[in-house]
Image: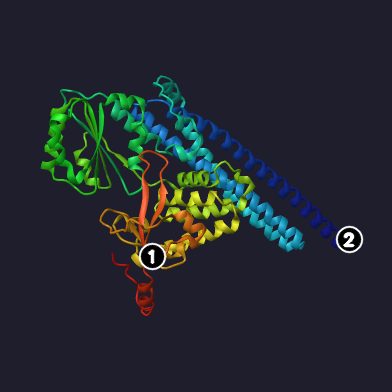
Amino acid sequence: MEVAMSVVASEVVSRFISFLMDKYQSSSHAESEEKVLERLQHLLMRACTIVEEAETRYITNSGMMMQLKMLSEAMYRGYSVLGHSRYRALQAGARIEKVSSNDSSSSSLYLAKRSRTTTDKVTCLESRGALESLEFAIANMVEFIVLLGGCERMSRRPYDVYLYTDNFMFSRHAEKQKLLSFLLQHNDPHGDHAVAVLPVIGGPTTGKKTLVAHVCGDERVRSRFSSVLHLDGDNLLSILDHGRTMVGTMLVVIEFASDIGDDDWQKFHSFFERTGRGSKIIILSKLKILVRFGSVIPIFLTVLSKDELRYLFMALAFGSVDRAEHPRLVEIGDEFVKVLNNMQGSLIAANSYADVLRKNLNVQFWRSTLDKGKRFLKRNLSISGVQPSTHLAQGHRVDITDFALHPLSMTRYTINVSIKEESPSVTLGGIIADPSVRPEGDFILTSWVSRLPPHKSFVYFVTSHAQDTCEGSALSGRKRRGVPI
């Protein structure tokens, strides 16, 4: 009997000690995680301050541009991790509270707490990784900050100081500085390239025109060139007929949809060498082959990273509203980012969705809109096998049945499309919010109008394919190849 009592007492003491140790480790872990997030938030404030100050200076040092790019990437990653950590903490707390109120059994509470512990571990690893990246980036910024103080300050413009994401160009910090440096640098009049050429290469909707328009709005750039010419690469040589009327230092921006022969390019380039010293040329295209005409290292614009896309989309969708008050919407917002990321980070789609969502902060509406977006992406991938934005850029039609709740498809609105003058016009946001606003017959659809120069409108021509859908339903065993133009 005494032996049995001794064993029981020993077991009780052992479990009690284990309980105390687990509790200590748990509280220590929570405290450690809290300190990591506090440190991350503090470093994000420092990083944001450095990036914002760099935006107000003219940076010509290529090494500083690379450092700025590294810092901005670490900053957006940190913001993404911090947002996820806050949401997961709220979600885990709500789950345990729900289990506690509905089912007080120890097994249910244990499973809920175990799930929270697993989540905490994942969050902790992500937070520490983001913190280490940011610490490394900032630790190497001492010289950057010293050199930044010696860089000339830019003239402030209204939309530069108005901290609202709709009204200034997001990200592209290093690219803006590189383009500015190119435009403000004086050419060597005795060099091989009297007219310097910078190719800006990127896919559709990566912001090539917006980047150039943003930099060309700078006061020093405007005063540097007597005129800015925007040319179409398909009619490039037509400018040769205006040689007598073109004088002074010019900035020429050329948009190429297709390649051009070397001989034609040489004629064009020689023409500007004769018209004025100090003139510069910017090439805009998605074709990498055109970098052969550049006299300096080209700028390559890629789609936004997932962290950048999340930062931008959340800022656009919530505006000035505190996201902490809408944890369910934050969760849905993260799912939207996944959809947008699958759409190659389309800036048009991000702005179009955000415009609609910000006007109605309702969980059911956000969820319904997200489901429409998922079905839209899935339907078009099954039809064409490529992303909708890519399909549109190639001149093909894209199915928007899931938004309009009616068999409709849209194509790019060009002068080659026959449209009646009285054709009605609606916005994509209007159709998503209320499909009944869809006009009868063909109509013009405005997906988004950029608030930044050159204030491009993304407009499409929409037609019904109800008859095609009915005919295609009889061929259920065959895969549709898309709607003919």
Q: In this view, does 188 lie above or below 445?
A: above
Q: Name the residue under label 1.
A: 441
Count of numbered marks: 2
* Circles 1, 2 touching at the beta carbon (< 8 Å): no
Q: Which amino acid does label 1 sit on?
A: Gly
Residue 452 is marked as none
Q: Distance from label 1 to label 2 (Cα)? A: 93 Å
Of residues 183 and 130, the one nearer the viewer is: 183
Residue 216 locus on image (x, y percent) = 33, 32
User: Residue visible at 33% across and 41% down?
Assistant: 209
Q: Where is residue 53 in the image (x, y as percent from the top left)?
A: 46, 27
Residue 288 is situated, as x and y percent measured from the top left of the image, at 25, 46
User: On the image, numbered disc 2 is attached to which residue?
Assistant: 2
Q: Quadrant of the N terminus?
A: bottom right
Give how far across and how far down residue 24 sits, in percent: 72, 45
Foreground: 387 or 217?
A: 217
SS class, disc 2: helix
Task: Specify few, some or many for label 2: CA neighbours under 10 Å numbering under 14, 14-19, or 20 or more.
Answer: few
Q: Which residue is drawn at 49% across and 63% down?
A: 436
Residue shown at 59% from the left, 46% from the top: 85
Badge 1: residue crowd in 10 Å (few <14, some 14–19, many ≥20): few
Does residue 128 appear left or right of residue 197 in this picture? right
